[in-house]
Image (cartoon, grey):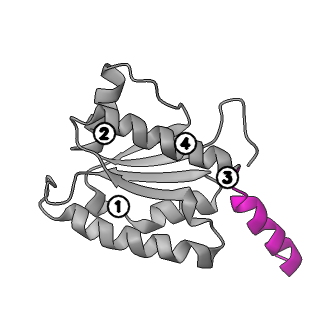
Amino acid sequence: MPVTEQGMKIVGFLCNWCSYGGADTAGVCRFKQPTDLRIIRIPCTGRMDPLFAAKSLIYGADGVLVSGCHPRDCHYAVGNLYARRRLEVLKHFLPFMGIDPRRFHYTWVSASEGQLWQRVVTDFSEQIHQLGPNPGIGAESEIFEKLGN
């Protein structure tokens, strides 16, 4: 997936109760943020299927960011504890799929932490820009061509 004039494609899965509010707070306070992030609002990081992140990267997203409530501060009590376990497993599994694990990041940001949100998004976006475009599906299609599919 070539880099467009709009920049890199970063997908963000944000908890409705905390991180989405943190992103909104950053916007209301007019903090400068990268424009590469495409936000998908989810009810809780506990409902975040790791395949959402894996498929995004396989199909060419340059980076995936997952953000939710701080541990022990989940709107649904333990959703983010489940998420942390699943997302940590995914992070260790990405190299076996041929994906640089630096293209994936998860974090915790509450609704009142607009400045933290700005820093997380800016740092992750800079990291993705340093890595360059994700070959994603392009590399996969070359393999399929060699196999005759």
* Eye-nearest disc, 3 or 1: 3
N-terminal label among 4 and 2:
2
Secondary structure at badge 4 equals helix
The residue carrying mark 2 is 20
Q: Are marks 3 and 1 in contact (CB under 8 Å)?
A: no
The residue carrying mark 4 is 125
On screen, residue 78 above or below 109: below
Q: Main secondary structure of the magenta part?
A: helix
Q: Which residues are magenta?
A: 133-149
Q: Amino acid at mark 3?
A: Leu
N-terminal label among 1 and 4:
1
13 inside magenta stretch: no
The residue carrying mark 1 is 48
Residue 87 appears left or right of 102 = left
N-terminal label among 3 and 1:
1
Displayed quadrant of residue 118:
top left
